[in-house]
Image (cartoon, coloured by chain):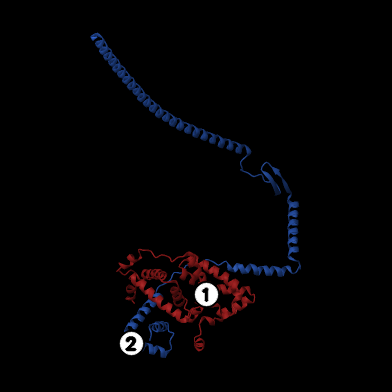
Chain colours: A red, B blue
Amino acid sequence: MAKINQTIKPVFLETTGDTLLVKKVQSGDAKAFQQLVERWQKKIHRFAYRILQDSDDASEITQKTFIKVYHKLDTLDEPQKFPAWIYRVANNLCLDEMKRAGRRKAVPLDYQQEHSGSNGSPEKQLQQKELGEVLRQAMMMIPDEQRTVIIFKEYEGLTFREIAEILDESENTIKSRMYYGLKALRKVLKKWNIQHEYLNDD
Amino acid sequence: MTKKEAKKRMIDYLYGEMDDQEKQEFEQYLQSHPELKKELDELKDTRNLLGSAPEDIPEQKPLIIPSLFTSEESGQKSEKRAGILNLSSAAKTIFAAAASFLIILFGASLSGLQFGQTEHGFYLSFGEAAVPAGTISEEDVVRLIDQIREENAMMMATMIEETADQQNARIEEALNLMNAYYENRRQQDLMLIADGLNQLEEETHFRFRQTDQALGSIIYALSNH
């Protein structure tokens, strides 16, 4: 196991820029924090938006994340693990938000009817846009923990090892969630009659 | 290969986390397990779909955090600058207050400070005391208050009148009902009395006749003797 850990070197743990900045902030460099914010705020906002699917909530989570980072950065013993750490902070805040709101944003009921009957092929652009919307809705239908893994993997481009570190789970658990997540997503899309329509074109 | 392992392998394969040898082995395994191959293809399709759709990520609201830091930063800087005078913060405050007071006094002496009281209240001004223009005079206020008072009184009067009317109507109705009821009772009573009288009359008549008969029989008996 130790050997594998050495061979698979996570991409983001090598971002020396972050490590350096974190060390600077920890030694009291205020400008470094500003740089850290500039480097990460887009990523965190995008991540929070993908998780919560709400622009205001995402902005709030981003804000909260950096406030927490600001106050807790001293406690980060290994500055090279900053990316996993900040994602974890953001993810936990997102989980809190979801729990607080007790929500899973409802998918409109007419979705099924709307899409099951459409045989015609509209313009590609419209199709693409619609597909994006459909995917967005479908993602909200699958369990949160599976969705989180899919987002980390597919959109944030992290390795399974990195995701495992962020979520404090084993790599196998993460892979399992990925598997079931993809399965669940496919099931939802199939129910809406989406999959074939688009995939046969490809 | 157990099912659990197969799932893990599929994900590894799909996301390129296998070395060449593992990959080869897995591909061979897939050839002899078509159902697994099908499942893998489905997973791949779903994955491709995820990557093919554009995403609309809305603009992020500006963060407030940077100011959190910059304020502290500027605080540090000003402290450094103040170092020239080498004052403690309390002394600095007093000094600043004294300085601003001096500036005000100086400005006041130049422009002529005025302080006083008008019917509107106290005023403190540099130069000519500006009388607030376009405001309502006392007379206007009094007139306004009178008007409001008058309106209120009228409103109250109408209200009271309406209420009194309503009450009168209700009382009248109640009286009428009572009247009807008593009239009814009286009629019944009269009839009862009339009945009673009739009965009494009949009874009296009957007694008379009985007495007559009795007298007749007594007279008859006496005359036979």
Nearest the viewer among B215 and B77 is: B215
Nearest the viewer among B30 and B70 is: B30
| Position in image of residue B55 (x %, y %) | 43, 71
Q: Secondary structure at mark 2?
A: helix
Q: Is residue B59 visible?
A: no
Count every numbered label the image shows and give the total: 2
Q: What residue did someone put label 2 on?
A: B31
Q: Specify the label residue A88 is tagged with.
A: 1
Quarter of the image for the C terminus of chain A: give it. Answer: bottom left
Pointer 1 indicates a residue of which chain? A
Residue occupying the far left of the picture: B224
Nearest the viewer among B173 and B163 is: B173
Q: Quadrant of residue B134?
A: top right
Nearest the viewer among B206 and B69 is: B206
In the picture shown, does residue B24 fall above or below B200?
below
Amino acid bearing label 2: Gln
Label 1: few (<14), some (14–19) or many (≥20) C-alpha neighbours in 10 Å: some
Residue occupying the far bottom of the picture: B21
Q: Is residue B196 visible?
A: yes
Amino acid bearing label 1: Arg
Relative horizontal placement of residue B98, taking residue B15 as reference (left or right): right
Label 2: few (<14), some (14–19) or many (≥20) C-alpha neighbours in 10 Å: few
Q: Secondary structure at mark 1?
A: helix
Distance (Cα) linking label 2 and label 1: 40 Å
Pointer 2 indicates a residue of which chain? B
Same chain assignment for discs 2 and 1: no
Q: Residue at x 34, y 73 (%)?
A: A195
Q: Specify the label residue B208 is tagged with.
A: none
| Position in image of residue A179 (x %, y %) | 40, 78
Residue occupying the far front of the picture: B225
In the picture shown, does residue A90 fall above or below B189?
below
| Position in image of residue A165 (x %, y %) | 51, 79
